[in-house]
Image: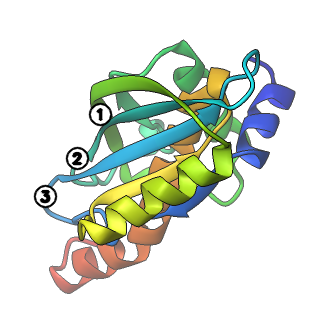
């Protein structure tokens, strides 16, 4: 996958609902995701991908391993995107703390409907069910793992400041 494909996937990824919690400093954090993408060859057909994304507790990395995103359960496009991020992500210095992500429990379903209505329904369902650990993300169908990894990196970015403060309080930095 080339740079333009990554940029296209990133530009067309919309997080409609973020998980409320951040990545724990001294434990692992799991949250559920619903990735929603329009099928390119069928009108009013939408793919829902549901699963779990687990972030292992962040680790302070050695200089030789800075900015390495560890992935488990992801495909080749996600690994290529992670490698691209590591090389080109100027504002990703927080990755030196070693985030590891695992994708599991993946289920796919194709439904009929307009993309925006399916997205709104998924967000409303999560809110109605009180699901604070669920993310709802609109993605590009063939690059959906890039969108999922973007969600993971965005969640890690939101968590990094708190993680570093906790390490400082405990004398680890």
* The C terminus - image quarter: bottom left
Label whose residue precedes the other's in the sequence (1 or 2)? 2
- Residue 88, position as x, y percentages in the image: 73, 42
Placement of 68 over or under 137, stated as above or below:
above
Instruction: Tell me the tag on residue 56.
Output: 2
Mark drawn on residue 27 = 3
Kindly indicate whether the residue at mark 2 contacts the one at mark 1 (C-beta within 8 angstroms).
yes
Q: CA distance from mark 1 to mark 3?
A: 14 Å
Q: Earlier in the sequence, mark 1 or mark 3?
A: 3
| Depth order, front residue of 143/56 | 143
Examine the rendering and report whether any part of residue 99 can be seen. Answer: no
Q: Quadrant of the N terminus?
A: top right
Q: Nearer the viewer, mark 1 or mark 3?
A: 1
In the image as oriented, which residue stretches furthest toward the bottom?
A: 169
Q: Which residue is mark 1?
A: 102
Q: Classify mark 1: residues with Cα within 10 Å, few (<14), some (14-19) or many (20+).
A: some
Residue 100 x, y percent position in the rendering = 32, 40
* Displayed quadrant of residue 133: bottom left
Horizontal arrangement in the rendering, residue 119 relative to residue 84 (left or right):
left
Given the current orientation, which residue lies at the most extreme right position? 4
């Amino acid at each position: 996958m080339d740079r333009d494909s990554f940029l296209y996937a990133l530009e067309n990824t919309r997080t409609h609902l973020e998980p409320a919690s951040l990545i724990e400093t001294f434990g692992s954090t799991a949250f559920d995701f619903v990735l929603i993408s329009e099928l390119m060859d069928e009108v009013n057909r939408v793919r829902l991908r549901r699963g779990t994304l687990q972030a292992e507790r962040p680790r302070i990395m050695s200089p030789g391993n800075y900015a390495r995103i560890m992935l488990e359960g992801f495909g080749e496009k996600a690994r290529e995107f992670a490698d691209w991020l590591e090389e080109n992500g100027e504002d990703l210095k927080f990755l030196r703390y070693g985030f590891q992500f695992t994708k599991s429990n993946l289920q796919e379903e194709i439904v009929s409907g307009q993309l925006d209505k399916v997205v709104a329904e998924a967000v409303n369902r999560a809110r109605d069910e009180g699901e604070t650990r669920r993310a709802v993300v609109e993605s590009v169908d063939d690059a959906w793992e890039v969108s999922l990894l973007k969600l993971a990196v965005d969640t890690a970015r939101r968590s990094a400041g708190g993680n570093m403060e906790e390490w400082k309080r405990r004398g680890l930095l």
